[in-house]
Amino acid sequence: MYYSARALYSRKVNFKNVLGQSVSGRQLVRAIAYGITTEEAHEGEFHEALSGQGFEVKTKPLQTFIGGQKKGDWDVGIATDILRLEPKIDVAVLVCGDGDFVPMVEFAKEKGLRVEVIGFRESTSKNLIESADSFFDLSSNPKQFLLQDVKKPPRRKVKIIS
């Protein structure tokens, strides 16, 4: 969602409001956010903010392969967590647009789990939308689900006299 919001709107996602939409008056069992860590460690504040909003944050390091290709992928971890939680929950809400989750969604539904998908319609796989029990489009209300740009004050020129 982070990258979709940046690409579509040049803004950041309001994950607190997305969590509220996900729960929609139901009892929250667990909210898990999946992140990647890099050697530069710029994502620490973001992960802390998610944790402060009620998310359990799981991270793993970005993998770098021979030739310089990089990969940070949580697909198997997310699918495993959903299926591991299946006996304890009635609904799984997947905040993602990746069509790779279609087989997992179909399998979870066969097990009796209701699977809802939340994402930006423009960047969510049509097959994922069709396989889910319901789809909520974050683009339907960008003011609610995107953070307002925080403008930094202009830099002042300072002259030091000694």
Image: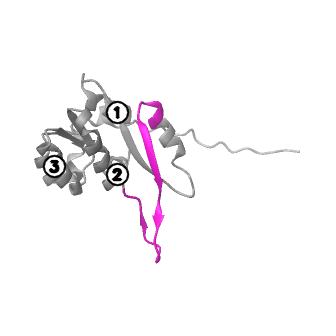
Sequence-wise, the earlier of marks 1 and 2 is 1
The residue that mark 3 highlights is 107
Q: Is residue 54 left or right of residue 85?
A: right
Q: Where residue 67 appears, x then y in whole percent?
A: 46, 77
- Residue 62 is inside the magenta segment: yes
The residue that mark 1 highlights is 30
Task: Find numbered disc 2 in the image and state the secondary structure of the residue it sits on.
Answer: helix
Residue at horizontal 13 percent and vertical 54 percent from the top = 127
> Which of the two residues, 26 or 147, is positioned nearer the viewer here?
26
Calculate the distance from the C-alpha at mark 1 to the C-alpha at mark 2: 15 Å
Q: Which mark is residue 77?
A: 2
Q: Residue 71, located in which quarter of the rendered image? A: bottom left
72 to 48, vertically: above or below:
below
Kindly tell me whether residue 13 is visible in this rendering. Answer: no
Which region of the structure is painted magenta? 50-73
Sequence-wise, the earlier of marks 3 and 1 is 1
